[in-house]
Amino acid sequence: MSAESSNLSNIEHRAVIKYFVKKGKTPKEIFEDMVSVLQESAPSYTMVKKWARLFQQGRESCEDDPRPGRPVTVATEENVRKIEKLVLANRRIKLWQIAEELQISKERVGEIIHEHMNMRKISARWVPKMLTPFDKQRRLQTSKDFLELVGDNIDEICDRIVTVDETWIRQYDPESKQESMQWTKKGERPPKKFKAREAVVQKRRGKLSRGVLFLQDNASVHTARVSRQALKDTGFLEIDHPPYSPDLAPSDYFLFSNLKKELRGRRFVDDNQMKMAVESHFDCKEKEYFLGGLKALYTRCEKCISLEGDYIEK
């Protein structure tokens, strides 16, 4: 998911919870759904359970209740200037570090940064290259084509998709995406760092009769002539994927990111131990987990159209 789409305020989180409660979902189902889409920006399960209970009891407001005797605000112009100076000097600075420096609570620091400075913390995203106007037009058209394909049958379409990709898993990965996050103002561009058939028959029975939709990125191993011919021989229908768009590849924004988040910080003595950890991660996941990642593609395509459509079509 893009940085903007995952950056929801507490009020927006509660509005989503309220909507799902009215649809009859349980707190656990709401939490899993929000994590599948928002990932690291999703609220905690405790918060979801608390607000789900309040809405089930008839609460309608998503706002915090007024607190009598609340202390005088520390969101003064002087504090805002001091915090802005610290953040701009070190974009990776932590809330607790600012709080210690200014002798105010971490909660008030977060309030000033989010509400008064209009900033949020996001991580840099690796991209192969900067997109050209042609690449952006391709992304826009691909997103429109996918939304048209899905229509009102998102469950049926997602159940027909087979996706393939590969990634590097290291025996030790010291820095997490959380550690590389930087404070940015709303509207600023996020930081960037430059840089087969038998299985389907056995694992996804019934899919071949409905027609397999094959989704993969444009890596050279996927676009090679022999790969294209093998795909053609299977009779699979290929879903177009725009170039240099890891944010529209389910493996990148969902599958691999969650895998690496779980493995990050762990040390493996050899490749076999690492392979066992990877297999264990996926073996314990239910079908709904993978379908959730594919369904998030629909939202991402909608976001792609809203963000890039105006720029390209004007």
Image: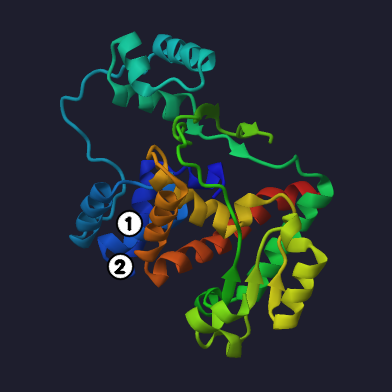
Q: Label for residue 18?
A: none
- Residue 22 placed where, x, y %? 31, 66
* Residue bearing the label numbered 1: 31
Looking at the picture, does residue 231 appear above or below residue 208? above
At numbered mark 2, what does the secondary structure look like: helix, strand or loop? loop
Front residue of 180 and 311: 180
The amino acid pointed to by label 1 is Phe
Q: Residue at x 66, y 63 (%)?
A: 216
Front residue of 228 and 141: 228
- Residue 302 placed where, x, y %? 61, 59
Residue 175 visible in the displayed image: yes
Looking at the picture, does residue 163 appear above or below residue 152? above
* Residue bearing the label numbered 2: 25
Side of 77 where 61 appears, left or right = left
Query: In the rendered structure, which disc, 1 or 2, sits on the residue that comes first in sequence?
Result: 2
Residue 18 visible in the displayed image: no
Q: Residue at x 58, y 72 (%)?
A: 162
Side of 7 where 144 appears, left or right = right
